[in-house]
Image (cartoon, rainbow, N blue to C red):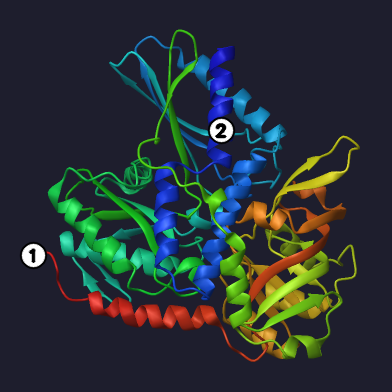
Amino acid sequence: MDKFQESMYKLIVETSTKLPKDVRRAIARAKAKENAGTRAAMSLSTITNNIKMADENVSPICQDTGLPTFKIKVPVNVNQIQMKKAIFAAIAEATKNAKLRPNSVDSLTGANSGDNLGEGTPVIKFEQWEEDYIDVRLILKGGGCENKNIQYSLPCELEGLGRAGRDLDGIRKCIMHSVYQAQGQGCSAGFIGVGIGGDRSSGYELAKNMLFRSADDVNPNEDLRKLEEYVMENANKLGIGTMGFGGETTLLGCKIGVMNRIPASFFVSVAYNCWAFRRLGVKVDPNTGDITEWLYQEGEDVDFSKEDHTAGEQQAKEETRTVVLEAPITEEQIRELRVGDVVTINGAMHTGRDAIHKYLMDHDAPVDLNGHIIYHCGPVMAKDEEGNWVVKAAGPTTSIREEPYQGDIMKKFGIRAVIGKGGMGKKTLQALKEHGGVYLNAIGGAAQYYAECLEKVEGVDFMEFGIPEAMWHLKVKGFTAVVTMDSHGNSLHEDVEKSSLEKLAQFKEPVFK
């Protein structure tokens, strides 16, 4: 079992830090389709640069390493109890070594276990089979895309598409709607797994299992093959694009499975996965515990280290207005910004996520936030040999979770800018207009790219909330983001959602008889 534990540690590290070949090919194809100088092209340049940096640094591609989910097939008589213990030990070791972020939180107390172990975490699903080897698959699915999962109960009425019935065409409408409702909040362009039938729990499980398929495989069910091809062709006509900035590619993959159901229920379950599709697998010798083969290795590999990643970013900056900000920022500086401006930030920045926002509603801040910037981020942190904190991964988290608090927090403490991903709602937009603030969209999943911009950890407060939810005080240089909500009532997110809804309506008429 020591060797098996070592093999599981290798699988965890590889999954967290290196995207599989099929995902790299899908991202490369998407990048080739975008028009140079656009926000989508700039985003994809940042994404491919981030993939390269994660390869080189052997550090998490995205700071949100999600809820590790193992799907394991074992021969008869293999000791699953001992295997589980070995996986737990490997998870704890990977967390200690900053290859995973500590993500296991007590749902009642909010306490973070610190090692990714706890009731229900990680998820390990065993299945016996008659082969003579162990098949282990692992997916690391972050919270931002997990929160955009959706389940439909047919028949139902869908915004923009009308009635969806209990047939293939109704299923088609549900899948198209699932892509629309995700917008950029799940770190588009994304991959979706779809489960048709079952009950509420088995339907979602089937949808997630579809994410273990190769992005390039062909569905053996002819009806589902046609449906997958239809969705891939038409979801990319919605214009949501990378990060929800608009663009040519909204969906990178669609895999659909089906199971029987009971007469009263007809569920269509969709599991949405971000572009940072961290899913790998290995074959293991049950006698030695050694890895005998890595899975998802078929096809051409894309080496992003050979690309010029700065060219796309530089061209986008040249074709848009670029502004440098350093806290404390004045209201006058904020009022000059418009949606579409590219902002480069130097100086002080403070992280703040769910626990911090809830706390600040009723308490004072530990530092002066007047004129400052809040970054929606739960970083992966480690200590160096001198015992100083260093940032290992630090991309943005999905901002919409802070919608109940954000406007009030900005007004209370004088915060001028918020950085996150996916945009925020009407309450925050109104507060930006009244108070004089902006929302800056960073590139979701680009945890290595942004970690390099964070020069120094100046301090930390609220470690009792756990590393992801603590308030980290950072010194940054060259941190780039795009103004997507300004102080004049403009929101790129509202515009893209409105235009994509109009485009969605063209898919209302029946396609499959």
Image coordinates of residue 135 in percent, x first then y, are: 39, 24
Marks 1, 2: nearer the viewer: 2
Instruction: Using the image, determine if residue 383 lies above or below residue 36.
Output: above
Write down the residue under mark 2: 12
Image position of 82 (left or right of 164) = right
Instruction: Using the image, determine if residue 71 lies above or below residue 200.
Output: above
Residue at screen point 38% across, 42% down: 300
- Which circle's residue, 1 or 2, is located before the other in the chain? 2
Q: Quadrant of the C terminus?
A: bottom left
- Number of other residues with Cα within 10 Å of mark 2, as a class: few under 14, some 14 to 19, many 20 or more: many
Instruction: Using the image, determine if residue 487 lies above or below residue 92.
Output: below
Confirm whether residue 310 shows in the render: yes
Image coordinates of residue 114 in percent, x first then y, are: 71, 37
- Number of other residues with Cα within 10 Å of mark 1, as a class: few under 14, some 14 to 19, many 20 or more: few
Specify the farthest residue to the left.
Answer: 513
CA gap between label 1 and label 2 equals: 44 Å
The residue closer to the viewer here, 234 or 462, is 234
Write down the residue under mark 1: 513
The residue closer to the viewer here, 463 or 326, is 326
Q: Secondary structure at mark 2?
A: helix
> Do the residues bearing badges 1 and 2 touch, measured as CB atoms within 8 Å?
no
The type of residue carrying mark 1 is: Lys
Instruction: Using the image, determine if residue 89 lies above or below residue 249.
Output: above
Confirm whether residue 59 shows in the render: no
Residue at screen point 48% across, 55% down: 274
Image coordinates of residue 139 in percent, x first then y, are: 47, 40
The type of residue carrying mark 2 is: Ile
